[in-house]
Amino acid sequence: MHDAVAARGVARRHARRSSARQADGARFRLSHRRVMRFLTGAALAVAAHCVLQGATHSFDVVAPAHAAGAAANTPAQAGQANQAGRPAVPAPRAPSQPRTTLPGFNPPPSFASGTTASGPVRTQPARMPFYVATRGKTTIYLLGTLHVGDPNDYPPNQPFRPPILGALAASPTLALELSPDDLLVSQDDVSKYGVCAYQCLPKLLPEPLWHKLSMRLRDNPAALVEIRKMRPWLAALLVETYDSLSAGLQTEYGTEAQLQNVYLKQKGKIVGLETLGEQMRAFTGLSLAQQREMLAQDLVQTPAENVADVQTLHRLWRVGDADAIAAWEAAKSEKLARDKRVSAQIDNKIVFDRNRRFVNRMMQIAAPNKPIFVAIGALHLGGQKGVLQLLRQRGFVVEPY
């Protein structure tokens, strides 16, 4: 359930390098825990992607993303930014009824779909989890992001719904998990703290877990060579990255990248809710037992089960209900945990501790009559320990839109 952008970029470059060397290698699939990491961090997602991208020219995926629009969302521009395949599964429940107008701004013109005499029905953007928190004259707009995605989530004519575009236009500050400057330098830190000078991974894992991992990568020997030098937490992210690419997910279509494509035209201010060091420590501070648990969870399910998880997660995100995502994650976490106590410790470090940090930073930035737009991994929003509930505890009224 954990992820961050920098390490993701590094892992992705490793995976793509391996893929170029082994074009007919095994297709991997995305488990629940791997998918959820794409929801909860920014730096690791980008860095994992960078490792993979610099390493390969192509990757054999189940559902490749369309080329249109990718040029505007490359990892280089992910320094100004940074998510899931089209599901067939229905969402467990519909989101609570959203309000139709937002406080504090005039919404942009609607791009309503429909067949007209002049043309076909327009593709609609993903709904995405979007909420407005108000306390007196202080307004915080919150969007739950995916750090990887599908181009169809962001139609060229209208990448976001009018309320989201209006909130962006009304906000002098866009707050992401990491600032663009931190994101640009994140890859070096991920390599520094996640990659060994020797083949350390087999020595850091119990033999049965190493055997299980090597069997997962047996059809891609280049990937196996790459992963041998990684610490367990980064190895887990690399396995997840292979799976996300196999499921057709790309960082080029992550929500953060798409937001910045829109927001930078407004010349607004972009800040981070945590520093690169803080995000990295959420992972590098994991004990060896916690890192092993992370990796073990990534290897629990069959490929078919992992693909089903990708589809369900993406469906929930497109529907836009943060609490439904949190409830689904909790159920899956219960299923996949090898050691429930250690699993809970991981969640606290990578999700819940960071939720509290995010809210503290929002309080420092927010001011009366100066809305801020916050875009963070969707898993951070819902549930009893999520950002939305933490804001309610601070006296905010939080409503979906």
Image (spheres, rainbow, N blue to C red):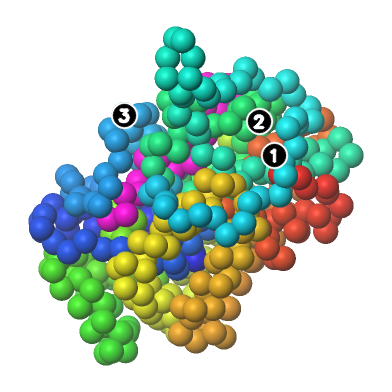
Q: Which residue is mark 2?
A: 163
Q: Does the magenta portion include 247?
A: yes
Q: Reading the chain from its start, which is encountered first: label 3 or label 2?
A: 3
Secondary element at tag 1: loop
Q: Is residue 31 visible?
A: yes
Q: Which residue is mark 1?
A: 401
In the figure, 174 relative to 281: above or below?
A: above
* C-alpha span from label 2 to label 1: 7 Å
* C-alpha span from label 3 to label 2: 25 Å
* C-alpha span from label 1 to label 3: 29 Å
What stretch of residues is rendered in magenta? 246-268
Q: Which residue is mark 3?
A: 68
Which quadrant: the C terminus?
top right
Q: Are marks 1 and 3 in contact (CB under 8 Å)?
A: no
Q: Name the kind of residue labelled 2 in the image.
A: Pro
Q: Residue at x 31, y 29 (%)?
A: 68
Q: Residue at x 44, y 66 (%)?
A: 32
Q: Reading the chain from its start, which is encountered first: label 1 or label 3?
A: 3
Q: Residue at x 30, y 84 (%)?
A: 209
Q: Residue 334, located in which quarter of the rendered image? A: bottom right
Q: Does the magenta portion include 395?
A: no
| Residue occupying the far top of the picture | 118
In percent of width and height, residue 284 lies at 46, 69
The nearer-to-camera label among 1 and 3 is 1
Q: Name the kind of residue labelled 3 in the image.
A: Ala
Secondary element at tag 2: helix
